[in-house]
Image (spheres, rainbow, N blue to C red):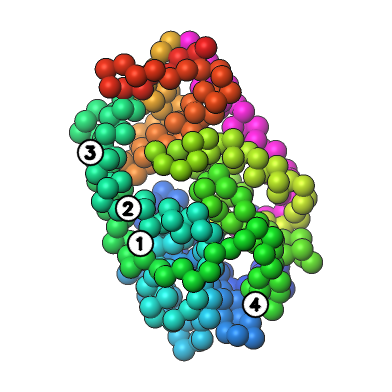
Amino acid sequence: MNDVQQAESQELLAKLGLKLVRHPLPFRLNHVNCFMAEGEEGWTIIDAGLNNDVSRELWKKEIGDKKVGQIFLTHYHPDHFGYAGGLQEKTSARVSMSKIDAGAGMKSWNEDFLDALPGYYRAAGIPQEAAQEMADNTRAFQPLISPLPDVNHYFEEGEKIRIGRLEYEVLFVPGHSDGMVCFYQREYNVLLAADHIMPRITPNISYWFHGDPNPLLTYMSSLGKIRKLDVEWVIPSHGQPFQGANKRIDELLAHHEERLEATWQMLEQPLTIFEVRERLFDRPLTVHEMRFAVGETLAHLEYLRAEGRCERVMEAERWIYKQN
């Protein structure tokens, strides 16, 4: 982003009355953008960061003695949802999110699901030791999302909400998560896009062995929904605000079409999920990144299977995909 674009994005945030609170993350994607805005009933916070020392100290500094009345959560992933329960305990704020993702946030790190994960990973063709490491990596997030928030209100599609002094519309944009929401400010034609549309990277679209069985199809449909708005400014949860939502949407759709075609070509020979992953993501990955790569690979395979372009069979307790 050049100096002019930087100044324009800062001016936009000021017009909206939004304060960006950037939380460092201990991953390659090294930050998450949370937001604050002051209204007649006190302050509203959008997303919470992880429940770790860094986020707790950052919020302590930012909130001070401010009255926080509302916490809006865009989705249940740990970098957005993690410290919501802790913030609620500190502020007594009302927490709102989608009912779908509230349920996912309660279930995704419970013991029954965590105990089942190594089996799912082995069915994906992942060696047993690596499968256990990936399951353990998921379990390690438990303290980063505890305590869980008491969700007081479930968002509805098209619901009007106030963030600071302005009115926004709640838009459901499932794909990155099954119940993800964005907030659209019609007067300024601005989308608080969360992880739905980002300027430089493609959001991870994964099947996590629960929920929507075809999240990539759902995501592409959600992109089409936002495309109809012809949004001028996008304020994402990772990266800088940018102009021209439709240009970026077209790039994202083209990216996934290319990945789908590449995945289908690989299936000229029968392959496990892990074998397809090795070809799609042919670079060294951390255990955390491996989980996302496997989930995204599976989402592309299941899209193709739903289209009838490939089939899945079980052989030696592993799922095998091959072209139809």
User: Mark 3 or 2 closer to N-term?
Assistant: 2
N-term mark: 3 or 1 = 3
Which residue bears the numbered disc 3? 132
Give the Cα distance between marks 4 and 2. Answer: 33 Å
- Tell me where the magenta segment starts and ends, as one range: 240-268
- Identified by mark 1, the residue type is Ile
**In percent of the image, x 41 and y 13: which residue is there?**
270
Is tag 2's residue or tag 1's residue first in the polypeptide sequence? 2
Numbered disc 2: secondary structure: loop
- Residue to which mark 1 is pinned: 145
Asked whether disc 4 touches disc 1, contact meaning CB atoms under 8 Å apart, the reply is: no
Tell me where residue 248 appears, x and y as whole percent.
Answer: 68, 44
Q: Position of residue 281 (x, y in %)?
A: 43, 30
Disc 3 residue type (three-letter): Gln
Q: Which mark is residue 164?
A: 4
- The amino acid sitting under disc 4 is Gly
- Gap between marks 3 and 1, in whole Å? 21 Å
Mark 2 near mark 1, Cβ–Cβ under 8 Å? yes
Q: Residues within 10 Å of mark 4 (few under 14, many from 20)?
A: many
Binning the other alpha carbons within 10 Å of mark 3 as few (below 14), some (14 to 19) or many (20 upward) gives some
Question: How far, Cα to Cα, is label 4 from label 1?
Answer: 26 Å
Image point 46% across, 43% down: which residue?
211
Give left or right: position of 242 versus 75: right
Question: Alpha-carbon distance for marks 2 and 1?
Answer: 9 Å
On residue 109, which mark appears?
2
Q: Are marks 3 and 2 in contact (CB under 8 Å)?
A: no
State the residue at coordinates (54%, 64%): 154
Question: Mostly what secondary structure, the magenta segment?
Answer: helix
Please, is residue 283 above or below residue 172 in the view?
above
Where does the N terminus fall, quadrant-wise? Answer: bottom right
